[in-house]
Amino acid sequence: MVQSKKDLFGAVFAEFLATALFIWIGCGAAISSNTWHSGNTNPEVGSVVGIALAFGFGISVLAYGIGHVSGGHINPAVTFSFLIRGEMSFASAIMYMLAQFFGAFIGALFLYASVVGLTTGCEGNTADQIDDGANVRLCSASCTLDENDVFGDCGAPFGLGANTVSGAIGQGSAFIAELIGTFVLVFTVLMAAVHKSNGSGPNAAPIAIGWSVMLAHLVLVPLTGCGINPARTFGPAIVALISGTNTFIRGAWVYYTAPFAGSLCATLSYEIIFKNVPTVEDDDEAV
């Protein structure tokens, strides 16, 4: 619990900074992986695994870095869980969430500044003139195409990894998938970092949390791009829009509702079923 205004400022700034870095790391890996991965337009195994590892290890490293300062939420859905459990005041939770959304925006800005030059060779050329599968894929995903099949104005490369629901699934299915992915994350946070008798100890919690994020990405990247974090969806989408990218996000509502629904389900499961259930260690002591 944050005890003073100074503590709250430090915690809020930590959430801002960690979320910004999380976007730069995770979405940056998505751009890098797709940029140099030639082939069809669908995510391939190597690309999905690399993206999942970056998001998973990224959240683990950052949670270790700021966990002792702010709790290492780095996600409005996680903050929402602490709010409804009564661990945070409403005002503190709102400040955390605002910091996370703003951090995601700033992280996406820095990511855009890091990769904007990737589309330099696209404008004014056709796919045949570019003559490189990976770069054609980059240009097709990032630039307009005129009636002569010439690439025109280019926005953020690959839309900065902005989430969108795949045309292969319905938006209802995407909602369920994002809900379950967020459930896995928040449930892991509660059981590994919050539960009084977690088996591995709180110092190991960021590892488990990072793995939960990685696993969610392995499943969801081809389906929804894997949101499970409204701030992660928000930052890249806004910066891509500002850059001139056509950022129509199919099923945008999913990314701002399913994570909170998944967080609510995970929190209720923890509070009602698991919070006071005796652990294996408790049973051993009773023998």
Image: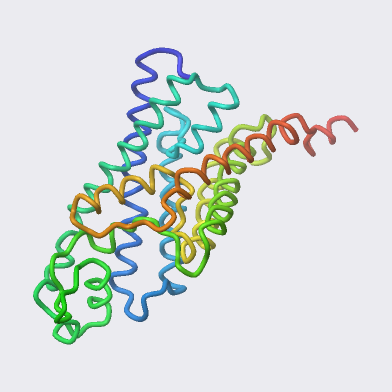
**Image point 67% across, 29% down: which residue?**
196
**Where 235 sits versus 284, above or below?**
below
> On the picture, is 273 further left or further right than 213?
right
Q: Position of residue 277 (x, y in %)?
A: 78, 33
Q: Position of residue 96 (x, y in %)?
A: 40, 29
**Image point 84% across, 31% down: which residue?**
285
Which quarter of the rendered picture does the C terminus lie within? Answer: top right
**Label tally:** 0
Name the one closer to the observer, 222 or 195. Answer: 222
**Where 97 sits versus 128, above or below?**
above
Q: Residue furthest front?
A: 147
**Image point 32% across, 57% down: which residue?**
248
Q: Residue furthest top?
A: 4
**Image point 17% across, 52% down: which residue?**
113
Q: Position of residue 188 (x, y in %)?
A: 60, 43
**Where 225 sits versus 206, above or below?**
below
